[in-house]
Image (cartoon, rainbow, N blue to C red):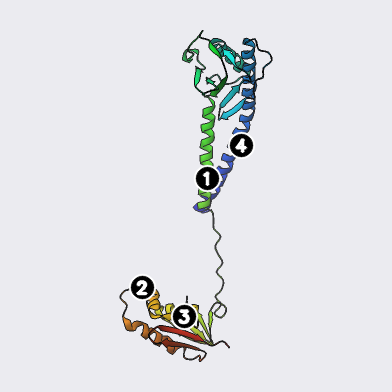
Amino acid sequence: MNQRKIYFYGSVCLAIFAAIMIFTSTKKDEPFSELVKIALRDVGNKLLLANQDSTSLILPVQKVEESKYQLSFEKELTIYPDTLVKIVQQSFQKANLPSHYQLEVKQCKDLEVAYSFLKNASVEKDIIPCGGRNMPQKCYTIEVRFLEKTATSSFNTIWIVLLSLSIIVAFIFFPKRKKIKQPHSTIEDGIPLGKFQFYPEESKLLLASNEISLSKKEVELLTLFVENPNKIIKREELSKKVWEDHGVFVGRSLDTYISKLRKKLSEDESIKLTNVHGIGYVLEVKII
């Protein structure tokens, strides 16, 4: 097995493995999201009960971003920061959710953060401000972001990058099948020109078994005429297309090559290179 194939099959295997890892990780995230939503609904219920409210609705919990969820309420409520911290901690522990998260309480009207705290696995690293300062009755939304899930997100990103690179490498090193070169057919592949067959790639004319060699310039000129049969091609156009970017053009060069082509085509009376005085040349082809 050559190195190209090793790269290709290695990339395919890596791509398959990366796809499996992403799929597996995504599947694992689904039950986590459901647990978070259940726990947040429990938080919402306890907050409403703390407000002596047992009838108003808790709106559906939304996943707004990766690892970020939003809890909303039907009616306004008063939030007691100390109570909020305790309720969230208890509900999350009961649901066995990660203990490293950031919580923000936002005002519905302007989405300004009215209160926030950071909970860590270690109590010493918790940041819980404003204890004992109650928040007035307003419309609030509560957003929680699980910081430990960020690692999972980064993990998925790495696998996505690896998957993309694997596909690119596999495409670059894809073992191309060699084209089977078909045997050259001297009759079928030529361009019909009267009694001749014209082979631009091989720089030749074929008349029966007689092969007539052509120079590069003769091929270029004859190609233009064959593409425009019975049409006048101006001298300027012929000169530009055949001699452009090929050095200095001498005025008589065109006439010289036309003369050579006339001689080589003279064996067939049905085609004729004619000079249109003062304008250019035309390849006259009689339709039989």
Residue 58: give x, y in percent of width and height: 65, 20
Q: Residues within 10 Å of mark 3 (few under 14, many from 20)?
A: many
Residue 225 has which mark?
3
> What secondary structure is found at the residue carrying circle 1?
helix
In the rendered structure, which disc, 2 or 1, sits on the residue that comes first in sequence?
A: 1
In the depicted structure, whether residue 224 falls above or below residue 77: below
Label 1 to label 3: alpha-carbon separation: 51 Å
Three-letter code, disc 4: Phe
Label 1 to label 4: alpha-carbon separation: 16 Å
Q: Which residue is mark 4?
A: 23
In the rendered structure, which disc, 2 or 3, sits on the residue that comes first in sequence?
A: 3
In the rendered structure, which disc, 1 or 4, sits on the residue that comes first in sequence?
A: 4
For this rendering, which residue is in front, 267 or 226? 226
In the rendered structure, which disc, 1 or 3, sits on the residue that comes first in sequence?
A: 1
Label 2 to label 4: alpha-carbon separation: 60 Å
Task: Give the mark toward the camera: 1 or 4.
Answer: 4
Q: Which residue is mark 1?
A: 166
